[in-house]
Structures are given as C-alpha cells and as structure tokens.
Amino acid sequence: MIQNYPLRYALLLSLTYALLFWLGNGNHDDVSYWNDEAAPYLGEAPAGMTAEIVRATTSEELPCVIYHLPANEAMQQKIITTLRLKKEMGWSKPSTPVATYYGSWGIYCGDSSILGSGVLTPRLDILADGSMRLIIDDTNAHDDPSMADYIPTPHPEYLPNKVLEFCRHAMLAIVCFMLPGLFCSIGWLWIQRRPIRSGDCFTICLLIPAIIACVGAYADFHIHGFSKGYIQLCSVASALSNILTALFIIGLTAIVKALYRCINQNKS
C-alpha cells in the first residue's frame, strides 16, 4: 500500500500546532482580558463590560485593549482615584467624549510586569450618556518611564503567575518559530529513520513546515491585533526560522551518519 507521508505530516503538524496555539491563547474572552490587565487595580469586571482589541495601524504601533463600561458613577470615581488620572481638555476622537482622563506620566506597576517595563499609560473617556471607554495601557503613548508614578496593587489576587506567564510566552514563541521545523525533520529523520536523500524529505522537512509556520504566524499576530505589514513580516520570519531549524536538524543528521560510517569503516 502506498503511504502518503507528506499528507500525514501536514495533518499531524496542523493538529499539533492548533492544539498548542489554543492552549496558549484559548482563554482570551472579555473577562479574561480584564482579569489579566485591569483586575489587579480595579477588581472584578463590572457587569456589562466588553473588551475590544484596537488593531495597530503601522508596524511601529502596538495593539491595545479598550474596555467599554456602562454608566456607573462609583466605578468612574474608582478608576480615576485608583489609577490617579487627571482631566485632559480638547482631545477629540470618533464618538467624542465629554471628558477624558489620563495618567499624566504613566503609572509604574512593577509587581505586575511579565515581559515589559511595568509602566502603564491609562486613559478614561467619559461619553455623553455616562458610559466609559477605559484603556489600561495605551501602548503607543508611553511617556518617560522615569517620570511615572508608582501605584499599589489593591487586588494582588488577580496578579498573574510570572513563571507560568513566561513559560506560556516561551511556548508560543517556540510553536511559531521552531515547532514545525522540529516536528517534521525529527519525525522523518530520527523517529522514522528515513534517508535525507529521499523523494519526500524536501517536502516533509522544509516545504510543509514553512507553509504551516507562515499560515500559523499570520493567524497568531492577526488575532492579537498587529498591523498588516507587521503580520506579513512575522509570517515570513516564522517560515524562514523553521526552514533554518529543519536545515540544522538535517545537517546534524548528516554529520552523525557520516561519523557513524567512518567509525564502522575504521573498525573493519
């Protein structure tokens, strides 16, 4: 019976990639975004809150999350007081707010930082009907971090586990930039012990990983709100890094086989 190995590897790699991608990103609903970003300072998500990812428009910008909150005077004052916001005048945007509050120099939250500097730039818009738009970290408006005010964390029970978060980010980086190349080349050359000079080696070890890595990276950076140009750049980088990973495994395999043959020849 003819074995369609390329198809098998494409399906197995796609399923593995999708599973690990879901494990790393599958819990990001509105409340999860709030718990990760806002809850350490403002507590439990208020009823009626929704979260919206604002996509970056250029490769230099970063996406951010806007929380839409219903009118609530107590929550409004809690946000302003806890995040030490100050009123700004003359700022306009679609659905122009009647008042805007912002962190004048940002706020320093060292105990909540996972990979960044720990400086957040919050912003609160109050609309005409009393509803609010809250940005915990306006990532494209960071001021001088040395001027940031330190604020305590009123709800430390919501702080993420830094070790687990670091491991999650590391896993997603490996999934995106190394997993396809490792999965296919190790499976084909080491587990199945197939020869490098075979008809399917190029397809399985190089072509399939490059395609799935490119598509997976595009989906990953797209759902996280990055700009189109940045997504395309990361997709190409992911494909190239997986090709290099596979080439390393192929080269290592060739060296080991050559040494093994040399040792056997000397013994004989």
Image (cartoon, rainbow, N blue to C red):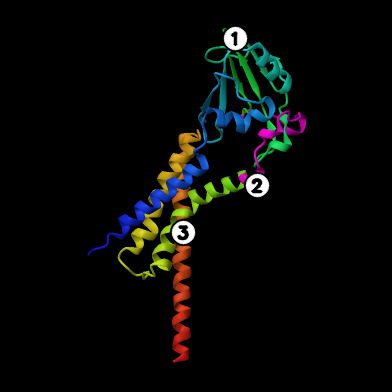
Residue 88 is labelled as: none
**Residue behind mark 3:** 182
- What amino acid type is highlighted by mark number 3? Leu
Residue 178 lies within the magenta run: no
Q: Residues within 10 Å of mark 3 (few under 14, many from 20)?
A: many
**Pointers 2 and 1 in contact (C-beta within 8 Å):** no
Query: Between disc 2 and disc 1, whose residue precedes?
Result: 1
The magenta stretch spans residue 151: yes
Q: Position of residue 175 (x, y in %)?
A: 49, 50
Q: Residue at x 44, y 54 (%)?
A: 180
**187 on left or right of 71:** left
Outermost residue toward the top in this view: 128
Q: Which mark sits nearer the N-terminus, 3 or 2? A: 2
Q: Name the kind of residue labelled 1 in the image.
A: Gly
Q: The N terminus appears in which quarter of the rendering? A: bottom left
**Which amino acid does the dot numbered 2 rest on?**
Val
**Could you tell which of marks 1 and 3 lies nearer the N-terminus?**
1
Which percent across, then down, holds residue 77? 70, 15
**Residue 108 rendering spot, x and y as whole percentages:** 73, 32
Left or right, 88 with respect to 252, comes to: right
For mark 1, give the secondary structure.
loop
Camera-side residue of 56 and 263: 263
* Residue at which label 1 appears: 130
Tell me where the magenta segment starts and ends, as one range.
139-164
Relative to 86, is 144 above or below?
below
